Image (tube, helix red, strand yellow):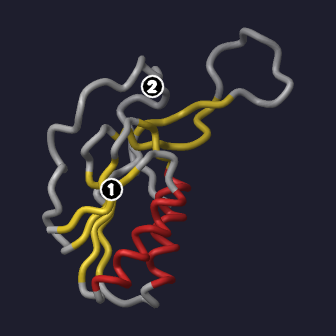
Amino acid sequence: MLMPKKVKHRKLQRGGKIRGNAKRGTEVSFGSIGLKSLEAGLVSARQIEAARRAMTRYVQRGGKIWIRIFPDKPMTQKGAETPMGKGKGTVDHFVAVVKPGRIIFEMDGVAHNIAKQAMKLAADKLNVKTRIEER
């Protein structure tokens, strides 16, 4: 699973609502087909890995896949049945902040219809609405 080797701050504040559109990473630049986010959200490292596996298995390890997002935001979770107070919980997993318009995955080197179907399978694993973009 994807996670940073080292972080400046172990626990980050969650922040408010994710506002605005993506400023960069909005064009299909490496592959010929891509998966673009249509809404804002937090995509976990597990979801990214599940989507990557679904695509890789469908194309039978052919072609090339680019992952254009990285989960670098730590999310904490307090233990089950822990009373209130006693500080912030431990880091449980990492998420990538995704804004509308961001390209999440790209693919090249396989037939167009196979790539499209693989992207559809990957989209089902993510918790944000997406659209398939072509170069």
- N-term-proximal mark, 2 vs 1: 2
Residue that numbered label 1 is attached to = 104
The location of residue 40, given as percent across then percent down, is: 38, 36
- Identify the amino acid type marked 2: Leu
Query: Dot 2 surroundings within 10 Å: few (below 14), some, or many (20 or more)?
Result: few
Residue 84 in the image: above or below residue 7:
above
- Identify the amino acid type marked 1: Ile
Viewer-nearest of discs 2 and 1: 1
Rendered image quadrant of residue 75: top right
Q: Secondary structure at mark 2?
A: loop
Rendered image quadrant of residue 21: top left
Residue 40 in the image: above or below residue 101:
above
Q: Residue at x 32, y 52 (%)?
A: 69
The location of residue 80, given as percent across then percent down, is: 82, 30
Residue that numbered label 2 is attached to = 12
The span from disc 2 to disc 1 (Cα, nearest Å) is 23 Å
Q: Is residue 83 left or right of residue 2?
A: right
Out of 11 and 110, give the one closest to the viewer: 110
Query: Dot 1 surroundings within 10 Å: few (below 14), some, or many (20 or more)?
Result: many
Outermost residue toward the top in this view? 85
Outermost residue toward the right in this view? 81
Q: Residue at x 45, y 57 (%)?
A: 2
Q: Is residue 8 left or right of residue 47?
A: left
Q: Residue at x 86, y 25 (%)?
A: 81
Rendered image quadrant of residue 79: top right
The location of residue 132, given as percent across then percent down, is: 31, 62
Out of 13 and 42, give the one closest to the viewer: 42
Q: Secondary structure at mark 1?
A: strand
Q: Residue at x 62, y 19 (%)?
A: 88
Residue 53 in the image: above or below residue 80:
below
Residue 10 in the image: above or below residue 109:
above
